[in-house]
Every structure is written in structure tokens, then in C-alpha cells.
Image (tube, coloured by chain):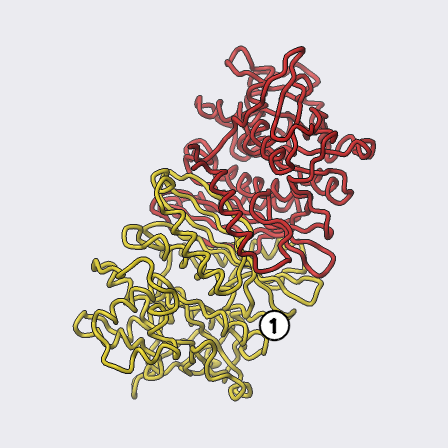
Chain colours: A red, B yellow
Amino acid sequence: MNEFDFIARLRGQAQSRRHSTRLITGIGDDGCVISESSGCDLIVTTDLLTENVDFLRGVTPARSLGHKALAVSLSDIAAMGGRPFWSLLSIGMLRDQWNSNFKDEFFEGFFELADHFGVTLAGGDVSETTVGIVIDSIVLGEVTAGRAIKRSGARPGDQIYVTGNLGGAAAGLKLLELGLSVRSPTVREGSDAGAGNDASASPDQAGPRSDGDAIQALLLRQLRPQPRVGWGMVLGERQLASAMIDLSDGLSSDLNHLCRESNVGAVIDAAAIPLDEDVRHLCGRRALDPLALALHGGEDFELLFTVDRDNVSRLPRAVDGVSISRIGEVSDDSGAVRIREKNREWDLGPEGFEHFRE
Amino acid sequence: MNEFDFIARLRGQAQSRRHSTRLITGIGDDGCVISESSGCDLIVTTDLLTENVDFLRGVTPARSLGHKALAVSLSDIAAMGGRPFWSLLSIGMLRDQWNSNFKDEFFEGFFELADHFGVTLAGGDVSETTVGIVIDSIVLGEVTAGRAIKRSGARPGDQIYVTGNLGGAAAGLKLLELGLSVRSPTVREGSDAGAGNDASASPDQAGPRSDGDAIQALLLRQLRPQPRVGWGMVLGERQLASAMIDLSDGLSSDLNHLCRESNVGAVIDAAAIPLDEDVRHLCGRRALDPLALALHGGEDFELLFTVDRDNVSRLPRAVDGVSISRIGEVSDDSGAVRIREKNREWDLGPEGFEHFRE
């Protein structure tokens, strides 16, 4: 049984045992949605990160890990159209890590991102482990009642969009695995980190980009993903998106998740996929295929969303300096996710990250 | 730096960065409390459980682990006086465990307890690890606005109570470590599990208790703790307790936590501490000291709470068949936690479980 089959079964079990009608969305989306009586819905999400699987200890600075632990859950709240307010963080570590600067640097990175988005650390747990670092990152957010964006709302004819650009985080992981490292663990947040995809950072790209700069930017896309919190709030509160998911497993996998939940298909246009400029810059020389990384790479933490044709004109061009790209259209061919390149068209199966395959 | 010093520092950092006045209670209590605009406060708690530290894999049946993972967080909600509604569960495991019955049995135990208390599984995360089982158990509950019970509300003269009886879980752990095991992994919930401390189970104790029965009951107190959800709700909604904490680390440690938060002291009476009958039954023969286990053992998941003298007469005698015992009184001698036995009195330092000591 693979990961998604197990979760589907667990979801059925949980649904049949539902003790309250206040649970609007349970297992199977980026976060759960709980109705409050105050005109707001509560969104809760949790992400478990373990050493060697979700991050490589030796090459991940503690400060970046603190950033990323929060970022992945902020991204889930964004994918539901919510505004994040509270975080609880559970962390387990070895005694050696406890006795080092690890925990202090970890929380420096965590607080820097939390402050940026006005998120308050409200609780958590600290534990010793005998096996290395374990992190569970919980974020709570809110959205106006009824405005949370599920994966299941896409309808045939809806236009498919992604924020920012894709493939950078996967390229960064490959560079980390090749032994490359960030120049300084205290590099400014939001400067290099978003350079590859923030319009605000475009002046950096006016001149010729060096290999070194491109490598640094890609490493930071992997180590310090920038959750699209602003876009999530705009799409949710203005009711612009019919369905949404964040790109954690990879475009091919996550688009398949969204289509399955919505019981629709999709056709996307390869030429419209926004490729990371730094990946393009380095490709060839480092055997990176930008399109393959963009399709299957994962961890870009951009938002993938669908928009009713009537709402397309209401979409802002950019939020927080991040623009969007229209990459395709939802079809009524349930379960068929296809990609078109020039005159060819083929099935785009889920080839992204999965914890347990069959 | 020990665990509690680190948490105290983190709490200061989080407090100085608080982005909202809606956080009523943050780091440093059994759960965080967030004000909602609907006349309710939201309580959120999380508990990280890792192999070899929080449980022993070889001797902990998967079903019991599923029960315990939820029970420890239900106990935290109870300790805040709240009613639990929702759970999110993050679980990481090895591929071997994934491919076995582990995950199915784990969720059987989880759902059995969840159904008992009307708690709905609303979300979570599943992850592969390279290091064994990791669980983060998140529970959300609610309480009427302003009625959450903090650790910090005890006042001199308040009477100190505990639910049920103490020492059984620690004795059960020693028995597990000696290689004893429960008779059947599918033993009925709430039967043996609560026998040592539920008044409803007292008929079992009418006849002579065999060593075997006592051992089984103690193993189940360790493996399947019964969170005092009913007592928590009564004490919270009726505003009977001035301060409360659950006994996870041990009475000596947890009473010290409560007194430090309330800036008071305490004197408890050794003779009034409700000792587990099965521990008494086996003590001597198995070198178990019932009082030491009750004071320092931990994991009983009973509730420790303080009550203003004027409210004592309003306390129910039992809730869900579980009675309470008055064990002492809050003093104005800040930080001094003392225990009295006959004519002697001595300091009761925190000797319970702590993840990272100096």
C-alpha cells in the first residue's frame, strides 16, 4: 500500500467516525478547516520533518532549518487561502545537538520568518531523541467563513495558474548533494532567497548573472523557501481561486492530487511553465533539465491554483512582487493530466516525491 | 542549559515577539489558549513521542501506542479545563513498519480512544523515517471564554487535589523493563486499564487480587493511560480549580512547575497521597517503593489542581467513576515545595522526568 492509498483509507475511517459537523475539510487537503461560530473558519496544518528524509543534516544550516520548518506549514495555510496567526513547534534532537548552538540558531531562523508574517509562537514540545532531529511544525490560520480554498473545487474550463517559477528548489537540492554550500549561514532573508522569483529582486538580474550567484540563489530556494502567504490571502479573501494546492511534492504530483480531488482532468502547456532563470543559466553545464525539474522536482512551495474564466480579469498581476503564470486549463476528462509541447501531447503522471511507494 | 531553562528563554523570546493580543496563554502551560470572538477560547496542545525515549518499541504494542499518543494530548486539554474536539496526528516510521500491520493497529488503538471522547481525526502527516517511530500528537479543544485553567492561578490557602491514584504507570514501566508483557494486545479498553483507579472497577477488587492481575493492571496504566477528560471539563466549566497541571513528569516535578508558575509554595501530606493499590500489593516482593513511585514516577496522567477553600464544598465526589484526594495546601512561601510525613517535613524537589538535564 502506498502513502496516498493509506491516507485515502484513513480519511474514509476518519470521515465515518466524524463526531461533529463543524469539520468542513478533514484529511486530504493542505490543512483541515474547522467552522467557528464567529464568521471565521480555523485552518490547522502540520508537517513532520525528519533527518535524512526531509532534510540533510550535514548540509542544512540550523538557521535555514528553522526557517524551512515554519515555511512549509505557512505554505499549507496559504494553499487554503488563509492568514497564518499561530505556530506550535515540536522538536526533538540528540543531546549533542542540545549542547551545541543548534537550537539557538534554529529558532533565530524560525523567528525571523515568523516575524515577517506576523506569526506568534504559541506552544510546542521539546524532546530528546536517540536518533537525530525530528520537527513537527504546526500552524493555525483563519479565513472568512466559507472562503477556504480546497483542492476539490476545480471545474472544467477553469484556467490553471502557478505563482513564481519552478525547478529552483530541486536544482538547489542537487547542488547541495554535490557538496556546494551557501556562502554564509547569516545571509539576509528575502534578498538572495527570493532572487530567482521575486520581481522585486529583478534589478539583481539586470547585469550578467554569474554561476556563483545562480548557485547561491538555487541553494537558498532549497534551504529557505518563501511561502506565498500574500497570494494565498488574496486568492482566499477575494474568492478568486476555485481550487488550490501548494507545490511541495512537485507539479506533476500536485496537479494530479488536485485533479483527483476535483474529479477533473487538466492539459498544461510545457512552454508556459515558468522555469527558474538560474536553473536555465546553469543547465547543460550541470546536466540539469529545467523542464524536468519544474515538473517533478518539488519543494518550490509555489501555489498551483485554478480560476473560473469569469474571474481571470480580477486576478492581480503580482502580490508581494511575485507574479503568476497561466499554464493550462482544467478538462472534463476525469483523472487525465496531460502536457502539450509543440504538436505532441502526453500523460503527465505523478513523478514527484512520495514517502512510501508500493 | 536544561530543558526548562531553555523553554523559559524561548517563552520570553516568543512573548516579546507576540503579534496579537488574542494569545491568552502561550508557551509554559499544558496547552496554549487563543481567544476566539465567539465566546469560546481555543486550546491547542502538542506532544512529541519518540522511540526509546517516550516509549520502548519492542514492548509497546502498536495498538497501545495509538491509544497513548492520543491520551497524552487529551490529558493536556483536560489540564486546561477544556473539552477536546479535534486531533491531528503526524507519524513517521521505517519502511519495515509501513509494510507491517503496525500502522493499522496503531490507528485502531487511536480511534478507539478518540471515539470514546468524541474526538475527530481532522488531519496530520505521514512520513518515512530512517530512524524509527516518531509521533506528534496534536489536540484542539475549547472552553467557555475565560475559563481555561492555567498553572499560574494558585493562591496561598488553596487546597491541593489529585484525581485517581499515583505510581501505577511508573511501576508498569519497571515491569515492562523487566520483560513482562500484557496478556493480549486486544485487551478491552477501560476494563483492566482503569481498574486500579476507577471506582466503577472496584468490584474487581472485592476478592483477593492475584499478582498476575496486579501486574496486568500496572502494565496497562503505563501502556494505556486514561486521560481525565471528564474531570478537566467539570473543573473548567464550573470554575472550580484555581490552577491545574497534568501529572506527566511526576508529582514532585509537576507540583514544582505549578508552584513556580503561581509564585507560591506548597506543603503536601505524604499520608494523603493516593497510592496505587496494585503497587502496594506488589511492593516489597518486587522492590517497588509505592511512595517514591507516586512522588517521582510520572506518566500517571492524573490531574493535579488547586481549589479555593470557598469552592471545596462544590467539588463533586467523583467524575466518570474517578474520585479525588486532597493532598495538601498552597503556601505563600514562594518556590518552597515541602512534604510532611508524621513529624518530619522536607523539601520535595523536582525528581521526575526531564528530557535534558544540565
In-front residue for pair B44/A172: B44
Instruction: Indicate left or right for B204 with A219 as reference.
Output: left
Frontmost residue, B196 versus B52: B196
Q: Quadrant of residue B176?
A: bottom left
- Residue sitting at x 65%, y 17%: A340
Counting from the top left corner in percent of width and height, residue B149 is at 55, 71
- Identity of the residue drawn at 73% across and 35% down: A320
Chain ID at mark 1: B
Residue closer to the observer: B227 or A7: A7
Which residue is disc 1 drawn over?
A: B147
Q: How many marks overall?
A: 1
The answer to whether residue A87 is above or below residue A214 is below
Q: Is residue A97 visible?
A: yes
Measured from the top left, where is residue A290 in percent x and y? 58, 18
Where does the image place residue B115, in percent across and percent down from the top left? 49, 61
Inspect the image, locate mark 1, and give the three-letter code of the amino acid beneath it: Arg
**Residue A204 percent location from the top left of the image:** 68, 22
**In the figure, is residue B225 to the left or right of A346?**
left
